[in-house]
Amino acid sequence: MTGLGGGGFATYFDAASGVVTCLDFFTAIPGVEGGVASSMTAIDVAFGGVPMRFSIGGASVGVPGVVAGAAELHRRWGRTPWTRLLEPATSLAERGVPLPDEHASTLPSVAPALVSGEGRAAYAPNGELLRGGQILYHPGLVDALDRIAQAGPGDFYTGVLGAQLVNDVRAAGGALGPGDLAAYRVLSVPVRRTVFTGRVVCGRDDLNHTIGTLAALPELSRLDEGDRAVAVADALAGPDPGGPGDTTNISVIDRHGNACVVTTTLGIGSSVWIGGYGVHLNSMLGEGELLRGPLTPGHRMGSMMCPLVVLDGRGVTVAAGSAGASRIRTALLHVLVNHLVRGDSLDDALSRPRFHVAGPLVHTEPGVSTDALTSLVKAGYDLNEWSTDRHYFGGASAVTPTQAAGDPRRAGAGRVVAGV
């Protein structure tokens, strides 16, 4: 779902100053040196039972930003030495990790992008797709992490890793060149704010306008279950690109009250890997829902990711983000409504059944209340009632100063660590 070859965003709240910062290290459009890409390869991905068209190959690869983003977060706010910071990831890369059942269930859908070239050794090492509980291991990834730890993050852009990245992308027909990597910079972007339940919600302005959607909601605490469902649906109503949303989110609050939410993604994955280093490169230029406006080399691509923090007069009360493409906004709204309006614990707020609005159609998980369903129908919405909880409905993670929770739909987890 993510990796060194992807891009992302971070929202950071500094407790001492009260300042919120949003960083953009999403993928940039390649071609600053005038390189011309070949055609992409179209693939069909059956997600939620509906076939969707994506494109992969070298021409789909945008300039990766995850390594630069991690380095910038460390430079601004990190305390742990860089080499030590990478030790846990290097240890996991050395031995591999068990593939969660929730991820294994989606692997057949995205296999056309993953099980190609070097991806076969990772996702179908014995000629069959990995099953839940089996070890996911990327041959060579430990060497990439070692280089980034010892030579520094710049190696990914202007060193050995960067040179290999360019060679592999260009061999696969992409336009990405050394100038694209050398010119890449992490950006500070404007912070949007709105008041929700008497608190201030802060985040970037994403393609789904998550902060603006929260601002459009009425006072939900005064509404019953049915009217509340209609109000949320009306705020969410709009087109639904419907892509998988292969994204990962991490939310953290420390004992000093600082908060950081980081959301990253590879997209569906390009099927192009950095040879010998176990790094799968992103497919952002093959994700049609992100291609809005002119594709100017060096400029950032748009995204629906929206890591956010919720503040009151004393500091941060919630830090949250989500995976799920067009359902990121949906998942975040449900989590905030459940926790801040209903009063749910974070575990309950993340696991409570959701619904997602796509124009006049509302997709509902099992367990959405009868009052909510009845009111949605009366309000003119058509229902598509899913029979099981699915990856489709997003993958949020959220923390408060005392609680932490991850989304059960995507094997998410939360942990409270004393003294952090």
Image (cartoon, helix red, strand yellow):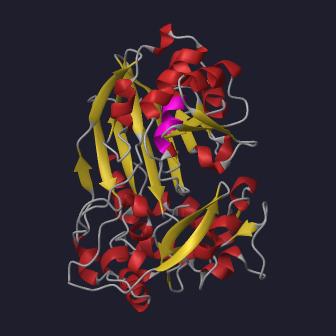
**Residue 142 visible in the displayed image:** no
Main SS, magenta residues = helix
* Outermost bottom residue: 171
Nearest the camera: 85 or 105? 105
- Residue 191 in percent (x, y) is at 26, 38
Q: Is residue 314 left or right of residue 57?
A: left
Nearest the camera: 241 or 13? 241
**Residue 31 visible in the displayed image:** yes
* Outermost top residue: 222
Q: Is residue 17 left or right of residue 133?
A: left
Q: Residue at x 41, y 57 (%)?
A: 81
Above or below residue 170? Residue 27 is: above
Q: Is 338 covered by the magenta stretch?
A: no
* Segment tinted magenta in the rendering: 328-334
- Residue 77 in percent (x, y) is at 34, 46
Q: Which residue is drawn at 42% across and 29% down?
A: 257
- Residue 247 in percent (x, y) is at 52, 55
**Quadrant (top left, top right, bottom left, bottom right) of the N terminus:** bottom right
- Residue 295 in percent (x, y) is at 26, 68
Q: Is 331 covered by the magenta stretch?
A: yes
Q: In this view, does 299 lie to the left or right of 249?
A: left
Above or below residue 363? Residue 107 is: below
Q: How many tags in the picture?
A: 0
Q: Which residue is drawn at 23% across and 65% down?
A: 294
Q: In which quarter of the image is residue 383?
A: top right
Above or below residue 222? Residue 312 is: below
